[in-house]
Image (cartoon, grey):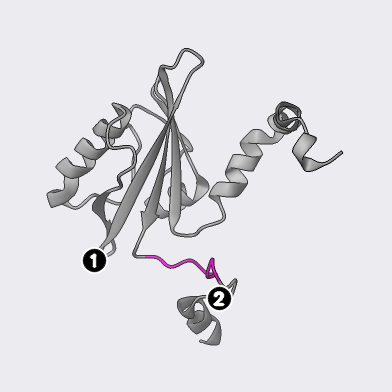
Amino acid sequence: MSINTYDEQKFWEEMDILFPDIVKAITSLAKKSYISITNLRNGVTWWSEKTMEYFGMQENYTIRGQEKSKRSIHPDDLEDFRRGFQERVAGKNMDEPWEYRVRDGSTYNRISARAKMLNDKDGKPFVIVIRYNNYGISDEVDATTGLHTEPALDREIR
């Protein structure tokens, strides 16, 4: 059997039981990227482990924005954050990132968020997946070269 003739549906059916673990593995690969998956029907959001670690959250699941973070959005960016999120939930500006700053100690890190909407079988919005990139943190390994980044190397040397 060649890969071109492999039944895609069969591939995903076989993966179905592991799918939650696959999502968790994918979302744990980057140190500076965080993922949220929100069920728009019931308002429940799942947060990746990296999200919980960085934002100091206690739970993976929250209901309708009730997450309690130990970090705060810059006061000047609060309205932009809310508007950006509401636009994406409404299906607007899906191909555009929105940015805001989050307190990290005595400074603020710039966060860029991008969203993807998934519709149900009737074409109605069902799930929104959001990836947040933290520009104040560098990943340990360069995605292009596969080598440790300079900050990671410096830490190892010290």
Numbered disc 2: secondary structure: loop
Q: Residue furthest bottom?
A: 157
Q: For this view, does 75 lie left or right of residue 7?
A: left
Tell me if mark 2 has few (under 14), some (14-19) or many (20+) residues whose alpha carbon lies within 10 angstroms of its own.
Answer: some
Circle 1 is placed at which residue position?
A: 106
Tell me the magenta residue range. Answer: 137-144
What predominant SS class does the magenta segment belong to? loop
Q: Residue furthest left?
A: 76
Taking the magenta stretch, the answer to whether it contains residue 115 is: no
Q: For this view, does 22 lie left or right of residue 30?
A: right
Mark whose residue sits in front, 1 or 2:
2
Q: Quadrant of the N terminus?
A: top right
Circle 2 is placed at which residue position?
A: 148
Q: For this view, does 28 lie left or right of residue 88?
A: right
Q: Residue at x 33, y 37 (%)?
A: 94
Which residue occupies the foreground of this view, 81 or 56?
81
Q: x and y percent of residue 139 in the render?
A: 48, 66
Which residue occupies the foreground of this view, 87 or 101?
87
Q: Residue at x 47, y 12 (%)?
A: 122
Q: Residue at x 41, y 17 (%)?
A: 124
Cα–Cα span, label 1 and label 2: 27 Å
Numbered disc 1: secondary structure: loop
Does the image show residue 110? yes
